Image: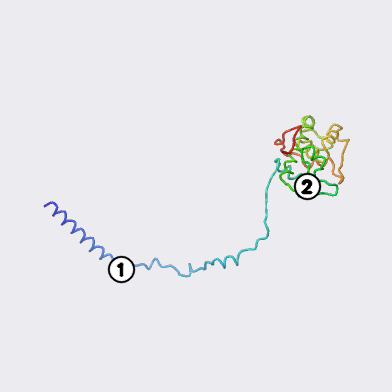
């Protein structure tokens, strides 16, 4: 009996739902207020060929890398001054690569083949760090004594001393500092210790550790 009553209710509910659904379907809905101007959305989307044809021409790669006063900034600035950053240049005096090393200087830090050196950029970077580490050890007392002082109108910094040592050799830098700037040095192009002290001042060269026996590994 209960089962029959439930079945009757289900049948009535189905009939009501069907009737109401069909009634809604037959009713008219006014969509006039939803109408939009068709020209508003009438635009063209370019295909792949059209997009490629209208692309702006590439004017060449442009890089902007700010190195600041970091160690990398120091060595890149020095390399640019020495050779405009070229690893393969050999000048008229036989100085080699990006940092313009003399072959005799390279032997001190364990590089014996100029041909291998000039064709290996990684070796040149390692050589620069080793040579600078060795100069920092040689000049350690002078760095401690003169950094912060003014000599020849230039405020002395550690990076300036290391750059000058790369130019003139650690011994000549010692003479310059200890003479108060009266014993100078100029290379074959007329570049002076004083100029390098000024040009490369204020860089962070703390990454370079003083090492008497620094060599390229």
Q: Residue at x 16, y 56 (%)?
A: 7
- Along the viewing direction, whichever of 137 and 157 lies nearer the viewer: 137
Q: Contact (CB < 8 A) between labels 2 and 1?
A: no
Residue 78, located in which quarter of the rendered image?
top right
| Element type at mark 1 | loop
- Along the viewing direction, whichever of 94 and 175 lies nearer the viewer: 94
Q: Residue 124 at x, y = what percent?
A: 74, 44
Question: Total number of numbered labels?
Answer: 2
Figure quadrant of the C terminus: top right
For label 2, the residue is 115
- Along the viewing direction, whichever of 117 and 38 lies nearer the viewer: 117
Q: Residue 51 at x, y = what percent?
A: 57, 65
Is disc 2 surrounded by few (<14), some (14 to 19) or many (20+) residues within 10 Å? few
For label 1, the residue is 28
- Along the viewing direction, whichever of 118 and 95 lies nearer the viewer: 118
Kindly give the residue lying farthest to the bottom in the view shown: 39
Q: Residue 112 at x, y = what percent?
A: 78, 41
Q: Residue at x 79, y 50 (%)?
A: 89
Residue 184, located in which quarter of the rendered image?
top right
Q: Residue 121 at x, y = what percent?
A: 72, 46
2 or 1: tag closer to the N-terminus: 1
Tell us which disc is closer to us: 2 or 1.
2
Q: Which mark is residue 118?
A: none
Residue 4, relative to residue 159: is it above or below?
below
In space, the residues marked 2 and 1 are separated at their CA atoms by 91 Å
| Element type at mark 2 | helix
Is disc 1 surrounded by few (<14), some (14 to 19) or many (20+) residues within 10 Å? few
Residue 182, located in which quarter of the rendered image?
top right
Q: Residue at x 52, y 66 (%)?
A: 45
- Judge whether residue 197 can be spotted in this image: no
């Amino acid at each position: 009996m209960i089962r029959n009553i439930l079945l009757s209710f289900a049948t009535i509910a189905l009939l009501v739902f069907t009737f109401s659904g069909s009634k809604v379907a037959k009713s008219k809905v006014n969509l006039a207020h939803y109408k939009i101007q068709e020209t508003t959305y009438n635009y063209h989307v370019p295909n792949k060929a059209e997009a490629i044809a209208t692309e702006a021409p590439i004017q060449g790669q442009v890089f902007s890398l700010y190195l600041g006063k970091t160690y990398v900034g120091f060595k890149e600035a020095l390399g640019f001054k020495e050779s405009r950053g070229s690893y393969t240049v050999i000048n008229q005096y036989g100085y080699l690569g990006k940092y313009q090393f003399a072959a005799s200087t390279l032997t001190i830090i364990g590089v014996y083949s100029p041909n291998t050196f000039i064709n290996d950029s990684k070796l040149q970077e390692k050589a620069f760090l080793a040579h600078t580490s060795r100069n920092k050890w040689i000049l350690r007392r002078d760095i401690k004594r003169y950094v912060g002082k003014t000599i020849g109108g230039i405020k002395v910094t550690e990076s300036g001393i290391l750059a000058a040592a790369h130019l003139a050799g650690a011994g000549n830098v010692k003479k310059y500092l200890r003479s108060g700037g009266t014993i100078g040095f100029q290379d074959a192009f007329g570049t002076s210790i004083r100029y390098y002290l000024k040009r490369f001042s204020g860089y962070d060269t703390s990454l370079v550790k003083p090492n008497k026996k620094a060599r390229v590994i």
